[in-house]
């Protein structure tokens, strides 16, 4: 569950220096990029020219403004004149006979200046982040697509009207078609282009991706074989693959799915010679689908980011808790190290004396080996603490449960030097290889064993004993830590896993809360059992390796 991680979306300002260079192309690169943009603009305009209203650039599907808004958002408003040039170039290439040059200039000026103004408001006034990292940013873009297109449509239609190119009775019809075409063109093209820079490794398996592709293809096929009227009725089928893709791939997947659907629908509309009104109806439905699916995608992204932030916070809190345990361990460590270091020193002195006396090499070697063994013991003690305190990313690996339990017992013993409590680790633990985060599993053990030890000391239990045992249950192992103290009083049992619940004067009340979040992060559970007569114990589960 927690192993499924998403790449954090870098804000525009956090792009690497190489990325910054890409965003400020210079010289030949700048010219090449501008030429590529104009070519793509004309190509998209040509491909999307369906039912041009009176032969003008008023169509129910117009992706070039989406391309150009993405250009201004990423490369800056200084590219607005290039938009004007691209618009005129498209009119010259595609509509030379129907659109006079002065009308082309004025309509494209209205478009480029109008949208540039909207991008300016988005970026300067509303702190819009063009990487679309949040629902807010996407809502701003969607709002700009709907409101911006309505305003620009008004300006463009006014130019046509004032130039005497559009009769008054058809103004509202022309405005509606322009508005729908631009709004949907922006809503589908701009997110796709803006997210292209953040294509993360898919978080779902290839089998699921193939299934998504097949369901999408099948739904589109249904749309292609049914009659024009039924197309509207069957449109809802497309929601299934589109929402599925958005939920699993976030905004990037949603943008790709919507764009593919739109392209196929429009190609179908041209091939089947669907009338202008039917295309407009289809586009209105497409707008509903796009808004629903893209919002779902961006919401999923935001939820994933929140989950990743929560996971980071959990790791940090558990690390802090380890550090606070570590303080206690460190003070015990001085005593713990004293013994092997003194022994090591003695063995080294003995070997030195043996060499000076000219003893046999075998004798000297024996002393040296003993010195080495003590050195290894001291190093292991320090390493154990170091491993425990190190801050590491949550990572699953296969390890032996007995090792983690043994490390935890050794760490608690160092921290609680002088307490006379027998800790027994059941031999069955040695046979259990689990798939979990090793440090965090050790931490669960440390917290529970420390609690048990403190309870035994607090209640002066004679012959205090802690018993760690394990039992396999299917693909899981249930690990139990029992002590022969009085256990948790009945009235506290419902609260012991709550953060900050403690009955100790110096307790923080975080130990068990951390245990619960660590166990759950590894796909396990944790609970407390207190039999009426039988022993009480803390139990947690972990996944067995390969289970
Ligand atoms: P803290 O140890 O700082 O109090 P924990 O979350 O680790 O915080 O424990 C919460 C409470 O649960 C403890 O204060 C104690 O009252 C109770 N508790 C935990 N383990 C035991 C135990 N083995 N025996 C009795 N009480 C326990």
Image (spheres, grey):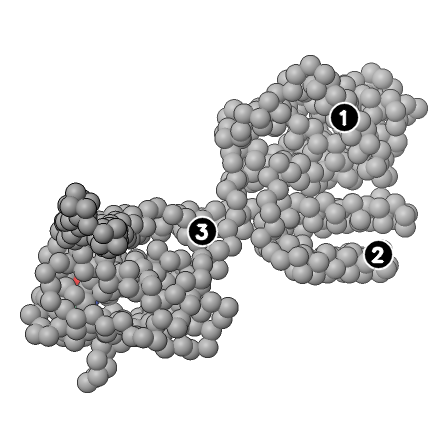
Which quadrant would residue 422 be assigned to in this image?
A: bottom left
Find residue 441 and report its horizontal and vertical position in percent: 34, 60
* Residue displayed at 78% across by 45% down: 263
* Residue displayed at 62% across by 36% down: 197
Mark 3 sits on what residue?
A: 307
Q: Is residue 309 left or right of residue 34?
A: left
Mark 2 sits on what residue?
A: 224
Give the vertical position of 509 relative to 43 (above or below). below
Packing grade of label 3 (10 A; few <14, some 14-19, many >=20) is some
Going from N to C along the chain, the mark reached first, 1 or 3, is 1
Residue 36 image label: 1
Going from N to C along the chain, the mark reached first, 1 or 2, is 1
Q: Is residue 484 left or right of residue 107?
A: left
Q: Which residue is nearer to you in this view: 267 or 155?
A: 267
Q: Cα distance, mark 2 to mark 3?
A: 40 Å
Residue 23 image label: none
Q: Which residue is nearer to you in this view: 210 or 212?
A: 210
């Amino acid at each position: 569950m927690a192993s499924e991680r998403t790449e954090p979306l870098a804000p525009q300002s956090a792009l690497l220096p190489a990325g910054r260079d890409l965003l400020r192309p210079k010289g030949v690169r700048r010219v090449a990029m501008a030429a590529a943009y104009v070519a793509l603009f004309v190509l998209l305009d040509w491909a999307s020219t369906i039912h041009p209203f009176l032969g003008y650039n008023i169509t129910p599907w117009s992706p070039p403004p989406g391309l150009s808004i993405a250009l201004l958002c990423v490369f800056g408003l200084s590219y607005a004149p290039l938009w004007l040039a691209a618009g005129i170039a498209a009119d010259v290439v595609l509509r030379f006979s129907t659109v006079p040059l002065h009308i082309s200039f004025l309509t494209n000026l209205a478009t480029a200046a109008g949208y540039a103004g909207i991008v300016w408001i988005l970026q300067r006034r509303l702190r819009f982040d063009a990487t679309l990292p949040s629902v807010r940013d996407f809502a701003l873009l969607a709002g700009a697509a709907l409101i911006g297109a309505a305003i620009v449509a008004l300006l463009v239609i006014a130019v046509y009207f004032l130039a005497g190119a559009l009769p008054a009775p058809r103004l509202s019809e022309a405005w509606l078609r322009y508005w729908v075409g631009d709004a949907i063109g922006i809503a589908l093209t701009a997110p796709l282009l803006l997210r292209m820079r953040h294509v993360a490794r898919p978080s779902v398996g290839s089998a699921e991706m193939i299934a998504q592709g097949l369901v999408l293809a099948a739904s589109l096929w249904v749309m292609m074989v049914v009659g024009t009227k039924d197309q509207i009725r069957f449109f809802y089928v497309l929601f299934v693959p589109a929402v599925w893709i958005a939920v699993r791939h976030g905004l990037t997947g949603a943008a790709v799915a919507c764009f593919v659907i739109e392209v196929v629908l429009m190609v179908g509309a041209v091939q089947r010679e669907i009338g202008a009104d039917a295309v407009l109806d289809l586009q209105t439905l497409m707008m509903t689908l796009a808004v629903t699916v893209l919002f779902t995608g961006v919401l999923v992204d935001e939820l994933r980011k929140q989950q990743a932030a929560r996971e980071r916070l959990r790791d940090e809190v558990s690390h802090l808790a380890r550090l606070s345990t570590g303080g206690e361990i460190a003070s015990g460590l001085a005593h713990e190290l004293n013994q092997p270091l003194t022994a090591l020193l003695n063995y080294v002195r003995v070997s030195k004396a043996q060499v000076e006396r000219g003893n046999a090499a075998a004798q000297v070697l024996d002393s040296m080996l003993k010195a080495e063994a003590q050195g290894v013991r001291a190093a292991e003690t320090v390493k154990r603490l170091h491993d425990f305190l190190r801050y590491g990313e949550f990572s699953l690996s296969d390890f032996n449960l007995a090792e983690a339990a043994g490390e935890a017992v050794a760490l608690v013993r160092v921290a609680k030097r002088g307490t006379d409590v027998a800790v027994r680790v059941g031999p069955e633990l040695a046979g259990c290889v689990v798939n979990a985060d090793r440090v965090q599993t050790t931490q669960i053990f440390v917290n529970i064993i420390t609690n048990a030890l403190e309870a035994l000391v607090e209640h002066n239990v004679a012959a205090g004993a802690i018993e760690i045992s394990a039992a396999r249950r299917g693909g899981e192992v249930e690990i139990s830590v029992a002590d022969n103290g009085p256990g948790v009083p009945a009235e506290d049992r419902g609260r012991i896993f709550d953060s900050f619940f403690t009955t100790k004067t110096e307790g923080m009340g975080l130990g068990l809360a951390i245990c619960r979040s660590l166990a759950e992060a590894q796909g396990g559970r944790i609970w407390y059992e207190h039999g009426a007569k039988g022993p009480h114990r803390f139990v947690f589960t972990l996944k067995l390796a390969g289970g």
